[in-house]
Image (tube, coloured by chain):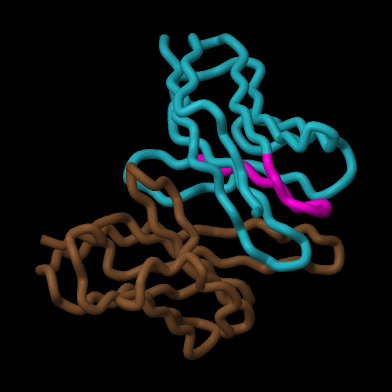
Chain colours: A brown, B cyan
C-alpha cells in the first residue's frame, strides 16, 4: 500500500476562495482523521470518521469548514470561504481501531497539505 | 475532558546521553498510548505504542517508553541520544471506547554533538 495520500501538497489561495483538500486512506482502514497543525495551536483534531460516518466534529473551528467521506477510499476537507488565519498544515490519518489482538491501533499519517491563504 | 500533556516545549541533551521526553494523560479507562515523531516538512511517523502487558515497550530507532498507570504517564526514553534524533515528538492517547486519537502539544528534542 502507498500509505495515506493527500493532495495537493501545497495550496496557495486568495482570501474568500473555496479550498478543497483531499485524502485517500490506507485500504481496509475504518477510521479517518483530519488534523490541523500550526505553531500557535500545535496539532488539533478537527474531525474523525468511522466507517465513513462522522463521529466527532467538535474540533471543526467554524461553519466555514466541512468534511465528507463519500466512500471508504476518499475524504475531503473544504473551507469556504477561506481566511488568512486558516493558513496551516492539514494532515489526514487513517487506522484500524482494534483487531482481535488489538495489535493494529496506530494511525498512519499522510504527508500533509500546506495551505497558505493570502 | 480528555487531554494529553507534554510539559516541556523543548528538551536539550548531548549526544550519547540518555534522553527522556515526558507525557501525562487524562483519559478514563485504559487507553491505548502512542509516541510519534515528526521531522521538518514531513508527516508524523509512528514510533511505539502501549496496548497492554509489560510497562516498558520498545519501538523504532532504539526508543522505548515506560507506562505508569498510577501516575498516568507514558514517558519516552532512549539510553543514548543521537544528533539525528533531533525532531518534534508527540504523545497520543486513544480511548478504547471511542476511537478518538488525541495528541499532546509536542516536544522539540534537540541533541547537540
- Where A34 falls versus B11 (above or below)? below
**Foreground of the two, A112 or A56:** A56
**Residue found at the far front of this picture:** B1
Left or right side of B61 for B86? left
Q: For the point 82% across and 54% down, which residue is it? A: B29
**Foreground of the two, A27 or A81:** A81
Q: For the point 85% across and 34% down, which residue is it? A: B70
Task: Please report the bounds of the magenta region as a residue range.
Answer: B25-37
Residue A81 in sight from this viewpoint: yes
Left or right side of A34 for A115? left
Left or right side of A110 for A31? right
- Where A37 falls versus B60 (above or below)? below
Quadrant location of the N terminus of chain B in the rendered image: bottom right
Estimate the x, y position of residue B27 in percent, counting from the top left. 73, 50
- Where A54 falls versus B11 (above or below)? below
Estimate the x, y position of residue A86 in percent, counting from the top left. 26, 61
Amino acid at each position: 500500500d502507498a500509505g495515506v495520500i493527500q493532495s495537493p501538497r501545497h495550496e496557495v489561495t486568495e482570501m474568500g476562495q473555496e479550498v478543497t483538500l483531499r485524502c485517500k486512506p490506507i485500504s481496509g482502514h475504518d477510521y479517518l482523521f483530519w488534523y490541523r497543525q500550526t505553531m500557535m495551536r500545535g496539532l488539533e483534531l478537527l474531525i474523525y470518521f468511522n466507517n465513513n460516518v462522522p463521529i466527532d466534529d467538535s474540533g471543526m473551528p467554524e461553519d466555514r469548514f466541512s468534511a465528507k467521506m463519500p466512500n471508504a477510499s476518499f475524504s475531503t476537507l473544504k473551507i469556504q470561504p477561506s481566511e488568512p488565519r486558516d493558513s496551516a498544515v492539514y494532515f489526514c490519518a487513517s487506522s484500524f481501531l482494534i483487531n482481535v489482538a488489538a495489535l493494529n491501533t496506530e494511525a498512519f499519517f499522510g504527508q500533509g497539505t500546506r495551505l497558505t491563504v493570502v | 475532558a480528555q487531554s494529553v500533556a507534554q510539559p516541556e516545549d523543548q528538551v536539550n541533551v548531548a549526544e550519547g546521553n540518555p534522553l527522556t521526553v515526558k507525557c501525562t494523560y487524562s483519559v478514563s479507562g485504559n487507553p491505548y498510548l502512542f509516541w510519534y515523531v515528526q521531522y521538518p516538512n514531513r508527516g508524523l511517523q509512528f514510533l511505539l505504542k502501549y496496548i497492554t502487558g509489560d510497562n516498558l515497550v520498545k519501538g523504532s530507532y532504539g526508543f522505548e517508553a515506560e507506562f505508569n498507570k498510577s501516575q498516568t504517564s507514558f514517558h519516552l526514553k532512549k539510553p543514548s541520544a543521537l544528533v539525528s534524533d533531533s525532531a518534534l515528538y508527540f504523545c497520543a492517547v486513544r480511548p478504547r471506547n471511542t476511537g478518538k486519537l488525541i495528541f499532546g502539544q509536542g516536544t522539540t528534542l534537540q541533541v547537540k554533538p
